[in-house]
Image (spheres, rainbow, N blue to C red):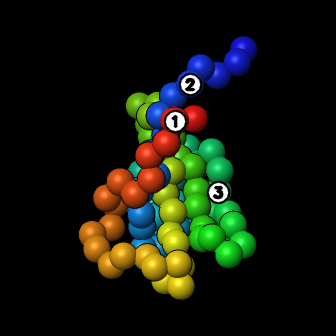
Amino acid sequence: GPVPPHWGVYFGVANVDDTTSKTDFLGATILVPGTEIPGIGRFAVIQDPQGAVFGIFLVPKVLGRIKGVASTPSVIGLL
């Protein structure tokens, strides 16, 4: 059936492909593998072993990516 409205969170990471590989190794399900959005950045969507879904992404420095701690919530939106 239709998916009800829900919140989605994306965490900023240093490397989408490395992080996706590590989560896969640790038992997560990769729902959307590393995907490039031209001119925006790279992202993936992952489901942890308990069923929680989240995204990861890396925004190019040309868009003003802020240096900081990886894995901090970076984008939260109502889906």
Separation (CA) of disc 1 from disc 2:
7 Å
Residue 33 - label: 3
Q: Are marks 1 and 2 in contact (CB under 8 Å)?
A: yes
- What is the total number of numbered labels drawn onto the structure image? 3
Few, some or many residues within 10 Å of mark 1 (<14, 14–19, 20+): few
x then y, percent, for residue 65: 43, 76
Residue 78 shows which numbered tag?
A: 1
Residue 45 x/y as whole percent = 57, 49
Helix, strand or loop at label 3? It is strand
Is residue 28 shown to the viewer in this render?
no
Task: Identify the element where label 1 is drawn.
Answer: strand
> Three-letter amino acid code at disc 2?
Pro
Q: Which residue is mark 2?
A: 5
Q: Nearer the viewer, residue 62 or 21?
A: 62
Q: Quadrant of the N terminus?
A: top right
Other residues around mark 3 within 10 Å, as few (<14) / some (14–19) / many (≥20): some
Dot 2: element:
loop
